[in-house]
Amino acid sequence: MLFDQIIDRKPTYAFKWEKYNGTDVLPMWIADTEFKCAQPILDALHARTEHGLLGYTVPAHHTAVNQAVVDWLSRQYDWQISPDWIVWTPGVVPAFNIVCKAYCQPGDKVMVQTPNYPPLLAAPKINGLERVDIGTVAIDGRWTIDLAELEKQAADPACKLFIVCNPMNPVGSVFSEHELQRITEICQQNDVLLCSDEIHCDLILDEKAKHIPAGKISEFNGKVITLMAASKTFNVAGLGTSFAIIEDAKTRVEFNNAARGIMPWVTVLGLEATLAAFTQCDQWHAELLQYLRANLDYLEQEINSIDGLTLLRPQGTFLAWIDCSGLGVENPQKYFEDKGVGPSPGIDFGDKNFVRINFGCPRSQLEQAIARLKA
């Protein structure tokens, strides 16, 4: 099977593998997969480089890729957008930092759903803002946002912005329609702008779950920022290409003004990869989801069979948020690394009693990790 292939990334300076370079630790941390890109993407990149010129390309002029985004969102989420709503960004991280800069003043507060991945946790402080954490709670075997805490904190007039991940990173939950309705009501009632990082939205593993883009919610009247990309799903994050969907013209202008002079255009190769991903890779995408579901089945069973470890099954992403509190160790990250497995440390996401395991890898690597943990 395509996704079973082991590809040696060590000679490519891959960030994921450089961290443990020279050690016998299997890297399972940063959120890119170990899967070779779909062939249509590789063919598109080859054709573009064979052309021989890689000069300036204004993303708005690349009508084919903009239409591909429109068609993808229509096909996947029944969300009808205009190409004019698309703002290309070199990653969702610069995008939500621009959001902080555009819509907040120094000293304002930004609510952030936690635990969350480190760049998002860091964004408020980088922009001279105060971060307010909105925690996550476990209900009926599933992680979900603490809506009561959100309602309480949003009532503070200093809270101007709420940044969420959907699906949630690292816990992997997909917001239900009810949860999104409550988030919408709370934001609307308190004049809070919602920025939704949906970079993992094309990786829904729970076949009963349905991803609903924030920008599709009519009550926002287009005044909401939805961040997406092909990068996580199709493993092209190194090409630095993502996009924001901003329907409201004034909100879009404010975003663009804040980005002016500091945020570069996305790369021409990133545009070509996104075009190929959204137009030629449906079968690859479907097979990827099936492979990840099987990996998760295996990981969930094995992790929960190890004394001291607990995994609540994520509904999306290729990331598993593992509770290590039952191990009785001071440093779960060191515990895993000493056994030859390198997860993301939970403390970086906001809870030192957890680690995050990336299961977007060939099954043999996952089996190797489990064998090391059980040894």
Image (cartoon, rainbow, N blue to C red):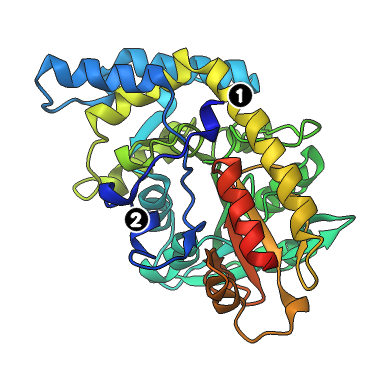
Q: State the mark number for residue 287.
A: 1
Residue found at x 67% / y 50%? 172
Q: Quadrant of residue 220?
A: top right
Q: What residue type is labelled 1?
A: Glu
In the image, 96 versus 327, the foreground residue is: 327
Q: Quadrant of residue 8?
A: top left
In the image, 143 versus 309, the foreground residue is: 309
Element at label 1: helix
Taking 70 as reference, is 265 above or below it? below
Query: Quadrant location of the N terminus?
Result: top right
Evaluate whether residue 292 shows in this view. Answer: yes
The alpha-carbon separation of the residues under discs 2 and 1 comes to 26 Å
Query: Residue 320 at what x, y percent from top left?
Result: 65, 54
Residue that mark 2 sits on: 15
Query: Residue 108 at what x, y percent from top left?
Result: 48, 69
Could you tell whether 292 is left or right of 39 in the image?
Answer: right
Query: Residue 66 at what x, y percent from top left?
Result: 38, 19
Task: Specify the farthest residue to the front.
Answer: 375
Q: State the mark number for residue 28.
A: none
**How busy is the neighbourhood of tag 2: few (under 14 within 10 Å), some, or many (20 plus)?**
some
